[in-house]
């Protein structure tokens, strides 16, 4: 409860900071719409020539695009800004101020930065997803919806842990922000079902850079394609990675000496 | 002329040293650059296989050839000036470049060409690996190869001039990211990066012929694939030459107007 209140405070501070630049809202809205238009036009061209893409019907791929925007927005809203800030504060030593606070430092580090305009992407993602669901009709029942939410949570846990582990590497190697850029360009591949890709690339997008769990797996849950193995695997991987990232974080903190002190 | 040559040689050494220093950035650039054509190559291969081996006038293997060549051509013509110029104006570092006796575009050209020379072997290597995986078919004709070289150089020149000019938007606004993104989305569609242009609806193809994007990426690829008649190839070179002139004129006009409003935001 206390943590939620903290998140609320950080969120408010960030909102107040950004509201000074209101034109940014229009600029970001424009950019998000442009990116969405690109996705939809791409789908339109491809489904002009085929009726299913590796077994995925147009509305199902549309749902995937919705998930892509939704999850991308969530990553951009909290995870990415927090991790970029963490790497920076390890380098310049300002992590000292976070460590002296009475709350858990990992938590504070993870929620203190919020890129509020990413809410636009989340909103667009929801809109696309809703459109796709209406068009898919009654094929999506309560069970699919519940598994979808579970898979979104598992995907969020996996992506969060993945980023935290990478960002924690900055305790050992000072320059790691480059790795984060790799994730961003790999995430683009998540616009399409990963089952499309040849084996080596599919494994890469699943286990090396876990894009598949962020986009394809939730979309599979929604369209009733998810196997029990994937469902269980995603949940177990999420829990394990959360624990591993915690271990990494603690080991990293022991390594941290504080550049400013 | 001698002084300019010295400048190019020095810039080459500087770029080379910088690239060896930041090897990780090079790797990241590679991943980003290869992944996008690779994704569309995979998507179109899947579509083509499910449609019985071909879509429109492309077979699965011709799609492979198209997107691998596209990766090479866009790798050769690529520029990053639109991201960099905003930084220069905002931080005021452009002021130092303006103090030098030569136009700042020269060091940018030298920097760009130098890093291409360094990245090209890697791109060719990746293209070879992709060729082993996706089995492209490519039947080269001597005249197409002969025309491909000037077409590629013109494509690079046109893209460089237009993007350098567009980068000057940073003189007027600090929000260039929206302009850049608009440009890239248009380019993705109209240059043939999402799909070969012949697969797009007829009206979009007409727009693509008028806009510069096809002449910066798609045209050299289509040429080498042997999809153009000699007449079409000549007309393409003509369109490239026309855009080159437009680019040169725009560059002069916009550069002069920009310098007048430049106030070095950071300085």
Image: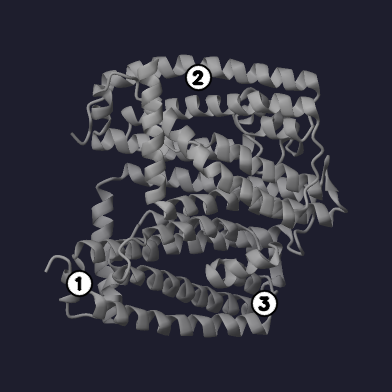
Left or right of A258? Residue A71 is right
| Upstream in sequence: badge 3 or badge 1 | 1
Comparing marks 3 and 1, which lies closer to the viewer? 1
Determine crowd level at label 2: few under 14, some 14-19, many 20+ residues with C-alpha closer than 10 A: many
Q: Chain of mark 1?
A: A
Q: Chain of mark 2?
A: B
Q: In the rendered image, which residue does mark 2 sit on?
A: B247
For the residues marked 1 and 2, what is the alpha-carbon distance in whole angstroms? 52 Å
Label 2 sits on a secondary structure element that is helix
Q: Provide residue A120's location: percent of width, then percent of height.
A: 44, 54
| Residue lying at 31% horizontally and 81% vertically, measured from the top left | A251
Q: Provide residue A105's location: percent of width, then percent of height.
A: 25, 77
Residue A23 sits in quarter: top left
Q: Chain of mark 3?
A: A
Residue A98's disc number: 1
For the residues marked 3 and 2, what is the alpha-carbon distance in whole angstroms? 52 Å
Q: Is residue A55 above or below residue B71?
A: below
Image quadrant containing the C terminus of chain A: bottom left
């Amino acid at each position: 409860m206390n943590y939620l209140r903290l998140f609320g405070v950080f969120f408010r501070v960030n909102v107040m900071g950004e509201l000074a630049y209101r034109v940014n809202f229009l600029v970001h809205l424009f950019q998000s719409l442009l990116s969405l238009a690109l996705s939809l036009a791409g789908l339109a061209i491809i489904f002009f020539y085929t009726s299913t893409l590796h077994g995925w019907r147009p509305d199902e791929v549309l749902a995937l695009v919705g998930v892509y925007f939704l999850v991308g927005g969530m990553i951009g809203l909290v995870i990415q800004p927090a991790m970029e800030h963490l790497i920076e504060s390890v380098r310049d030593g300002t992590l000292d101020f976070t460590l002296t606070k009475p709350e858990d430092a990992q938590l504070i580090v993870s929620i203190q930065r919020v890129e509020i305009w990413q809410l636009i992407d989340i909103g667009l993602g929801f809109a696309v997803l809703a459109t796709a669901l209406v068009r898919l009709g009654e094929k999506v029942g309560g069970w699919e919806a519940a598994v979808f939410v579970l898979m979104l949570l598992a995907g969020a846990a996996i992506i969060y842990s993945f980023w935290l582990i990478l960002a924690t590497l900055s305790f050992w190697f000072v320059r790691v922000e480059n790795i984060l850029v790799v994730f961003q360009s790999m995430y683009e591949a998540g616009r399409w079902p990963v089952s499309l890709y040849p084996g080596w690339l599919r494994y890469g997008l699943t286990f090396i850079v876990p894009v598949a769990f962020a986009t394809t797996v939730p979309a599979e849950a929604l369209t009733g394609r998810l196997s029990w193995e994937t469902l269980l695997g995603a949940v177990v991987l999420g829990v394990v990675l959360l624990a591993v990232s915690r271990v990494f974080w603690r080991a990293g903190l022991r390594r941290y000496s504080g550049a400013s002190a | 002329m001698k002084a300019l040559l010295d400048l190019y040689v020095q810039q080459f050494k500087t770029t080379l040293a910088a690239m060896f220093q930041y090897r990780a950035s090079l790797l990241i650039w590679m991943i980003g650059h290869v992944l996008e054509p690779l994704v569309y190559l995979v998507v179109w291969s899947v579509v083509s296989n499910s449609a019985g081996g071909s879509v429109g006038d492309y077979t699965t293997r011709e799609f492979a050839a198209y997107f691998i060549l596209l990766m090479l051509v866009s790798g050769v013509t690529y520029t990053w000036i639109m991201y960099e110029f905003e930084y220069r104006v905002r931080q005021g570092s452009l002021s130092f470049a303006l103090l030098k006796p030569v136009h700042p575009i020269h060091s940018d050209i030298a920097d760009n060409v130098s890093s291409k020379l360094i990245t090209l072997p890697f791109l060719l290597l990746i293209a070879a690996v992709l060729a082993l995986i996706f089995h492209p078919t490519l039947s080269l004709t001597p005249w197409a190869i002969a025309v491909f070289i000037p077409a590629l150089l013109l494509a690079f020149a046109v893209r460089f001039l237009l993007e350098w000019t567009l980068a000057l938007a940073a003189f007027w606004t600090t929000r260039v990211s929206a302009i850049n993104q608009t440009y890239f989305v248009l380019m993705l569609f109209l240059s043939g990066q999402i799909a070969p242009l012949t697969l797009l609806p007829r009206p979009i193809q007409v727009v693509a012929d008028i806009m510069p994007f096809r002449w910066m990426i798609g045209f050299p690829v289509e040429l080498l694939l042997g999809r153009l008649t000699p007449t079409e190839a000549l007309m393409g070179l003509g369109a490239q030459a026309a855009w080159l002139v437009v680019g040169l004129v725009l560059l002069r006009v916009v550069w002069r107007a920009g310098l007048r409003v430049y106030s070095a935001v950071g300085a």
